[in-house]
Image (cartoon, rainbow, N blue to C red):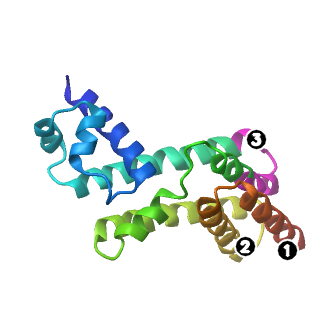
Amino acid sequence: MDRETAHTQLLDAAEDLFYRRGIQSVGMDDIRSASGISLKRLYQLYPAKEQLVEAYLERRDGRWRGRLADYVSGHATEPRARLLAVFDWLGQWFGEPDFRGCAWINGYGELGAVSSAVAGHARAHKAAFQDYLRGLVAAAALPAELADQLYLLAEGAMVTAGIFHTTEPAAQAKSAAQTLITTTP
């Protein structure tokens, strides 16, 4: 098996297990079993679990932000409608059968106090999401501070949806976002 295939199989297994069960509860042997890659090969590609965790968070970040941007651009053309489409996408994401909350919030909760790498990835992901919202707010010619308010609504919806396993927080946050958007000059 070539390096690229092994790498992909390891990341697929790590992403599934880390997201579903939590980072700390998953050992390298679990990932070996799920990926079908030998433990020796696994450690050749990722000498430490933290490196695999970082690769998982980095790959998931690109996928998550890509899915969000694709949905928003594909479902709304008017700038203000794009802001609301963010919450529609969150509702779809919350409804996915394997939804377990935000991987970066979960990872930070597990390891943020002891892993500067995990904390850094969580901060970078959240900053990128906030920057994305800032871009949408600017495109809608709305005051810059609205982005931070919408960001907090989205983040609160993510946490609530993850804890209660419901899509309802996305609709509630969208309603609040609509009020903020329409009452902002």
Q: In what element is the residue under mark 1?
A: loop
Label 1 environment density (alpha carbons within 10 Å; few <14, some 14–19, many ≥20): few
Q: Is residue 17 left or right of residue 170?
A: left
Task: Give the vertical position of 131 relative to 185 (above or below).
Answer: above
Task: Give the vertical position of 63 relative to 165 (above or below).
Answer: above
Label 3 environment density (alpha carbons within 10 Å; few <14, some 14–19, many ≥20): some
The answer to whether marks 1 and 3 mark residues whose Cβ atoms lie closer than 8 Å is: no
Amino acid identity at mark 1:
Thr
Residue on which disc 3 sits:
75
**Percent position of residue 180, x then y:** 82, 72
Residue 146 image label: 2
Q: CA distance from mark 2 to mark 3?
A: 21 Å
Residue 184 image label: 1
The residue shown at (39%, 53%) is 57
Task: Give the vertical position of 78 relative to 114 (above or below).
Answer: above
The answer to whether marks 2 and 3 mark residues whose Cβ atoms lie closer than 8 Å is: no
**Percent position of residue 10, x then y:** 29, 38
Amino acid identity at mark 3:
His
In depth, the one of 111 and 150 nearer the eye is 111
The magenta segment is 73-87
Sequence-wise, the earlier of marks 2 and 1 is 2
Position of the N terminus, as image quadrant, is top left
